[in-house]
Image (spheres, rainbow, N blue to C red):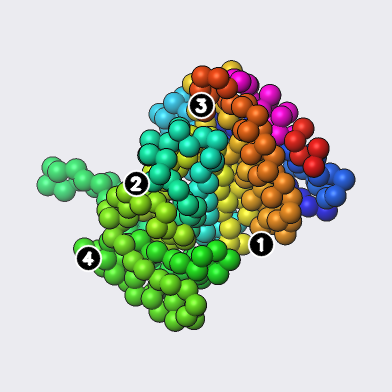
Amino acid sequence: MHNILITAGDGIGPEIMEEAKRVLSCFEGELSFDFTEKLIGGAAFEQYGSPFPKETEEAAQKSDAILFGAVGGPKWDVLPLAQRPEKGVLAIRKTLGLYANLRPLTIWPQLVDFSPLRPEILNDVSFIIVRELTGDVYFGEPRGFKEENGQRSAFNTMVYTEEEIRRISKVAFDLARKRKKRVCSIDKSNVLESMRFWREIVEDTHRDYPDIELSHLYVDNAAMQIIRKPSSFDVMLTSNMFGDILSDESAVLSGSLGLLPSSSIGGKNALYEPIHGSAPDIAGKGLANPIGMILSVAMMMDHSFNRPDIAKNIHQAVSNVLDKGLRTTDIWSQGMKKVSTSEMGHAIEKEIRMM
C-alpha cells in the first residue's frame, strides 16, 4: 500500500490535482493507494490560521509521497511573512528533511515553436537542475530588520555547512551516473566566501566520482549559457537561491511553465509538484495546464515507487495527446484544438488506458 498525501493548495491547485488523481486511477489495478487530503498554504491559513497546520504536518510524516498543487495569491500578500502561504512550502520541506529539488527540463518537439529560442538552439536539450533546499539566505541566521542612528536596514545571511553541500553534491553525482555523466556546479566563488566554500566541498566530494566530469560556472555566466547553449548542460548543481532563479529561467525554454514537474527529495518520502504558481487569475476557469502536475505523478512513480515503466507510459501518453493537436490555452496555436484542464486530463487518461 502506497500512502499518498494530497495537498492541492490554492488557485489552480485543486483543478490540476483532480487531473493527477485521474491519472493515478489508471494504475489502481497494479498498485494500491491510500489517499489522504489535507490543506496547505492560503487555504490552510483561512481554516486554521497557519499555512502548515499540525494535522497536515502529521499526515505528511506518515506518507510515502506527497502530491502538491500550488500555493499563494494576492489576497494573502498583506499577511506577515510567517503566515504567508509560501511558508507552508518551506515548512513541509523542512519537516520532512527534503534537501534536494530536482527539476528536469524537457523540450517537447510538438511545442518547440513556443520557446523564445530558435529551434536549432533547442536540439538535444535535456538537463536537470539539482537545487539545494535547506541552506542559503532563505534559512540563514541572523536575519531581520534593524535601525541604527536613524537608518533602517534589512539583512539575510548566506550560509552553508559542509554536510549540506556534500549531500546535495552526492545527489547530483549519483544522478549524473544515470545520465551523460556530466555535472556543472554553479557558484559565485569569485566574490562570496560561502560560494568559495561551496566549490571546495563540491570538488572534494567529486573525488569519490572519478567517472563523472565536473565543471564550474559563475551564476551570471550560467544564466547566459542557458540561453546561448542549453544543450551544454546535463546535471546542473546549484545552491538554494541560484537554483530558484536558474530553474525558472530554464523553464521558459519549454514554452510554458505549465509543462514542467519537479520533486523534492531527501528523507524517507518525497514531495512532487509542478513548477508553476497558483495563477489565481485563471483559477476555476478550466484554463490551467495540468501536464506539469501529471508529469509530477510520473516522477513519483519513478522515484518513490520504483516504477520507471509507469513513468514512461505517462510521458508517452502526454506525447500522444500533443501529437493529436490537443492544447490548453497556454500552448494553443492556430490549427490546434483548444481544450480545458479536465479535457486535457481526460485525453491523457484515455491514452494511458489504451496502452
Label at residue 227: 2
Please state the horizontal and vertical placement of residue 52, each as a whole percent of the image. Answer: 57, 42
Alpha carbon separation for disc pair 2 and 1: 36 Å
Mark toward the viewer: 4 or 1 = 4
- Amino acid type, label 1: Lys
| The residue stretch that appears in magenta | 337-349
Q: Name the residue under label 4.
A: 190
Asked if labels 3 and 4 touch by Cβ distance under 8 angstroms, the answer is: no
Among numbered discs 3 and 1, the one appearing first in the sequence: 1
Asked if labels 1 and 3 touch by Cβ distance under 8 angstroms, the answer is: no
Q: Mark 1 points at which residue?
A: 268
Mark toward the viewer: 3 or 1 = 3
- Compared with residue 130, is residue 27 higher up or lower down, i.e. above or below? above
Please state the horizontal and vertical placement of residue 117, each as a whole percent of the image. Answer: 37, 39
Label at residue 342: none
Label at residue 330: 3
- Amino acid type, label 3: Asp
Q: Residue at 31% x, 65% y: name it.
A: 195
Alpha carbon separation for disc pair 3 and 1: 36 Å
- Amino acid type, label 2: Ile
Among numbered discs 2 and 4, the one appearing first in the sequence: 4
- Asked if the magenta segment contains residue 84, the reply would be no
Q: Is mark 3 on a helix, strand or loop?
A: helix
Please state the horizontal and vertical placement of residue 207, each as a whole percent of the image. Answer: 44, 81
